[in-house]
Amino acid sequence: MATHPPGPKGLPVVGSTHHYARDPFRFIEAVRDAYGDAARFTLGPRETYLLTNPGDVERVLVREEGSFRKPDFQTDALGELLGEGLLLSEGNAWRRMRELSQPAFDMRRLAGMGSMMVERTERAIEDWAEDDCRDVELETARLTVGIIVEAMFGTDLGEDRTRRVQENLEPLGRRFEPDPLRFLMPEWLPTRERSSYRASIRALEGVLDEIVRERRTDPEGNDLLSILLRAERSGAIPEERVRDELMTMLLAGHDTTALSLTYTWYLLSENPDAERRFHEELDAVLGDGPPTVADARTLEYTGRVLTEAMRLYPPVYTLFRESVEPVELAGYELPAGSLFMLPQWGVHRDPRWYDEPERFDPDRWLPERAAERPRFAYFPFGGGSRSCIGRQFSLLEATLILGTVGRNYRLERVDEGPLDLRASLTMHPANGMEMRVRERGDADG
């Protein structure tokens, strides 16, 4: 096990893996409220520095990003899943793949995907009826996984493969839930959880293998898989890199959008005035037709609703970086090899940057109000050169899905009381998101 030098004197030591794992969200908020910009705690074998000042976040992600890298612990179990895909690769290998993949995310190409996103959403809700109860998290994930596969792999996932993907997501998620014992156990130690995790990886690899076999006979096009297959055929990338990029896109490409939508519908259900304004805007902009890419650009209040939902419930709730050289942050000199936590959850809900930070207020994203806050008081997609390559795709997709569903339905949360959350690689409702379908009538706002 690698050893790391002790932290600087004077920086408060605030807790341990046990405190973090018990409730990561409460822990992050408590540390921020008690100690401000920076504190340190033990995460497994590593001393970790929690940073909650947007200026420090910006330095790590943007202005001094060359001094930081993805930490090793994120490339163990996660590396088994994602390999050398864009999310985990470093250096020249990452830069070459980012450049190779970029045409698949060109906005002119994405604009041509709008009708597909809307049509898939319409099919997904065509059997909805008044008083139906639906697990919106599950149904939205099924929708977004189909969209990302068609958009980026150039094929239809189909019912059987969709079922196989969804059956294997839960074991993957459990592997990354905070657990003090897991941080301390060596990766080679066999456990039931790890066996289930590896079985799920093999099942997803089977789905991807089927798709690749189908597409090898027709690798033309500008979707990501076509680009990867041509690069493989030319010898620019090895075959295993195709697998890594597809697995990364399959998982990261659908999960965060599905969660953003899930939390948006939850927040609209809890805030009737915002829900009314949301529906009024849809009616005014869309009329009797489905939303288009052009409409997505003019749905300003809908955009603010989505932005505010990702502030309060960022699907990626924290990022980690490791310094590759000594750095000065938050007024402290910190050694090379230091591990940093940059928690969206803590920064997005910080009363220093947001009035009544736990209140759902889409109008805090009006330009004049948003301009008052530091740039990295909000970073749901990360930042710098390693910010999410699918950001524009995700925002377009989410807006069109919101518009398509919102034209026809309201959604009411079935459960009452606070929303319990479960931490994994992303932040999930602890018990799904059961919601009741309400058909919108002519007088319904």
Image (cartoon, grey):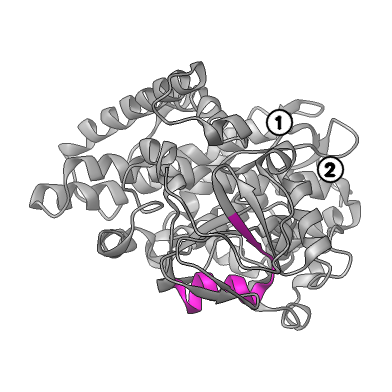
* SS state under label 1: loop
Q: Is residue 298 above or below residue 234?
A: below
Rendered image: mark on residue 432: 1
Left or right of 428? Residue 337 is left
Residue count near mark 2 (Cα–Cα under 10 Å), binned few <14, some 14–19, many ≥20: few
Of 336 and 272, the residue lying toward us: 336
Question: What segment is highlighted magenta in the picture?
Answer: 48-65
**Is 251 displayed left or right of 100 in the figure?**
right
Residue 420, by quadrant, is top right
**Tally of numbered discs:** 2
Residue 378 screen position, x and y as percent:
66, 67
Q: Distance between the residues labelled 2 and 1?
A: 28 Å
Compare residues 102 and 218 and report the one nearer the observer.
102
Residue 294 place in picture, x, y as percent: 55, 66
Image x and y of residue 186, in percent: 44, 31
* Above/below status of 347 relative to 181: below
The percent coordinates of residue 189 (x first, y second) are 43, 23
Report if residue 371 lies within the magenta region: no
Q: Left of 86 or right of it: where is 122?
A: right
Foreground: 172 or 5? 5
User: Is 51 colored magenta in this rendering?
Assistant: yes
Please name the predominant secondary structure of the magenta segment in the image.
Answer: helix
Q: In which quarter of the image is the N terminus?
A: top left
Q: Which amino acid does label 1 sit on?
A: Gly
For numbered disc 2, what is the local secondary structure? loop
- Residue under numbered circle 2: 441
- First in residue order: circle 2 vs circle 1: 1
State which quadrant residue 23 falls in: top right
Above or below 375: residue 6: above
